[in-house]
Amino acid sequence: MQRLSRFISVILILLMLIGICEAVVRNGSIRGKTGLSYGPITYSRTSANVVIRNSTKYNVNFGGSMLFLDKNYRVLARAELMTAKIKRRSSRTFRAAFIEGTGEEAKKARYVEWEF
């Protein structure tokens, strides 16, 4: 009886983990901008906060649009970042305002693309 209860509890834990294991990695390099990468993105209804890291030895001006795409590469949401300076070998948090879509739709996106 004790073995059966342990087995059931292990199965339940695995089933709970399977439900939360599907996640989209929200960090990576920014295509077209050497040395720049983005980190975690936090969403609200009208805006998103994203951390941009500069690993080069130069100060860089950065700004543009973030496109949130689904698995078929259709645009779910678009957020605009105002241009600002990122100092060398540092990071900066940007606030992006949604022009198209909302934060709820952007959370469902699988890919993030950048337009400059």
Image (tube, helix red, strand yellow):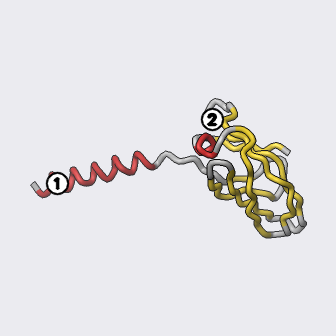
Amino acid type, residue under disc 1 in the picture? Ser
| Quadrant in the picture for the C terminus | top right
User: Disc 2 to disc 1, how far (Cα)?
Assistant: 41 Å
Left/right placement of residue 92 relative to residue 1 reads right
Q: Quadrant of residue 36?
A: bottom right
| Quadrant in the picture for the N terminus | bottom left
Instruction: Please name the residue that numbered disc 1 is placed on.
Output: 5
* Image point (73%, 63%), residue name: 93
Left/right placement of residue 86 relative to residue 45 reads right
* Image point (21%, 52%), residue name: 7
Above or below residue 10? Residue 106 is above
Q: Secondary structure at mark 1?
A: helix
**Residue 99, how many percent across, how many down?**
75, 42
Q: Secondary structure at mark 2?
A: loop
* Image point (27%, 49%), residue name: 11
Q: Which residue sits furthest front?
A: 46
**Residue 90, how many percent across, how many down?**
78, 69
Instruction: Please name the residue that numbered disc 2 is placed on.
Output: 70
Q: Residues within 10 Å of mark 1 (few under 14, many from 20)?
A: few
Q: Residues within 10 Å of mark 2 (few under 14, many from 20)?
A: some
**Residue 3, how many percent across, how many down?**
15, 55
**Residue 57, how many percent across, how many down?**
87, 68
Mark number displayed over residue 18: none
Q: Quadrant of residue 94?
A: bottom right
Amino acid type, residue under disc 2 in the picture? Asp
